[in-house]
Image (cartoon, helix red, strand yellow):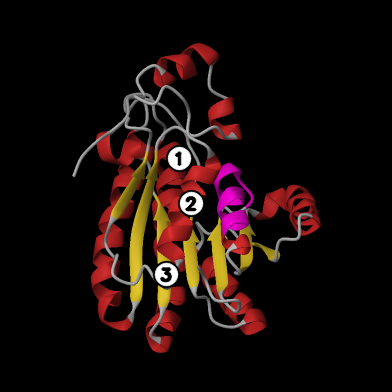
Amino acid sequence: MAQSNTLALVTGGIGGIGSAICRALSTDSCHVVACYYPAEESKAQQWLNEARAEGLNVSVYPADVADAGAAAAMIESIEAQYGGIDVLVNCAGITRDKTIRKMPVEDWDAVINTNLNSVFYVTKPVMSGMLERRYGRIINISSVNGQRGQFGQPNYSAAKAGLHGFTMAAAQEGARKDVTVNTVSPGYVATPMTGKMPPEVLDSIVSTVPMGRLGKPEEIAAAVAFLAAPETAYVTGANIPVNGGLFMSF
């Protein structure tokens, strides 16, 4: 369990999985700042009102994390207002699905920038402070499709696979200073994103999951909360799959 003065930043914090992560960390005594895409201002304010009505200790911050300057400015502003960030969850992500032959360069760039480059842009300034304070927990949200690939998702699969490569390298940099860096790789989870998929496609996917169902956002959040805890100090560079048995490896 986190200490009561722990500050956590969750990018993509008002999305389906991000919201569950914010709730779990807040319940675990963190003050959580949920980063959101600036165009979603009205959605973010509604999210904030509802979260605080639940008694959650949360704030929100607008930033396009796919922009290096905006990400750095966000970290500087948050740390000036609240203090050093102890827990970082990189959860921001988008999809632009097409086969390689049909994919516009713009769709490739958008997904790589949001799902992979943003993790470097946000982690770099946060990790610097963590190393100086000799404490930190960084959790990167990847995907089962980063492990096994997925037809029609070459951009998404590449970004999510790259995310764990980044995790393993960053984990080695932080290991001697109690800064752990880990990945959580969800399978297919019941969120607004999967809710947009054609029912027949979703049914086909669920039929391949040994547990026979979609995951719950709270099940992803539980893995994140485990990795965010001070007691999980000896787990670093790991990938925690939460996929209902869809992809098994060791």
Under mark 1, the amino acid is Glu
Q: Residues within 10 Å of mark 3 (few under 14, many from 20)?
A: many
Disc on res. 106: 1
Whether residue 162 is situated above or below residue 4 in the rendered picture: above
State the CA–CA distance, disc 1 to disc 2.
35 Å
- First along the sequence among labels 1 and 2: 1
Whether residue 83 is situated above or below residue 184 in the rendered picture: below
Q: Quadrant of the C terminus?
A: top left
Closer to viewer: mark 1 or mark 3: 3
Q: Which residue is mark 2?
A: 222
Under mark 3, the amino acid is Arg
State the CA–CA distance, disc 3 to disc 2.
15 Å
Under mark 2, the amino acid is Ala
- Which residue lies at the image location 81% right of the left edge and 56% below the top edge? 53
- Which residue lies at the image location 74% right of the left edge and 55% below the top edge? 51
Q: As drawn, which residue projects farthest toward the top?
A: 200
- First along the sequence among labels 1 and 3: 1
Closer to viewer: mark 1 or mark 2: 2
Whether residue 122 is situated above or below residue 17 in the rendered picture: below
Disc on res. 137: 3
Image marks 3 and 2: residues in contact by CB distance under 8 Å: no
82 or 77: nearer the eye?
82
Q: Residues within 10 Å of mark 1 (few under 14, many from 20)?
A: few
Residue 197 placement (x, y as % from top left): 53, 22
State the CA–CA distance, disc 1 to disc 3.
33 Å
State the extent of the magenta-drawn residues as a range.
14-24
User: In the rendered image, is residue 122 in sight?
Assistant: yes
- Which residue lies at the image location 36% right of the left edge and 24% below the top edge? 209
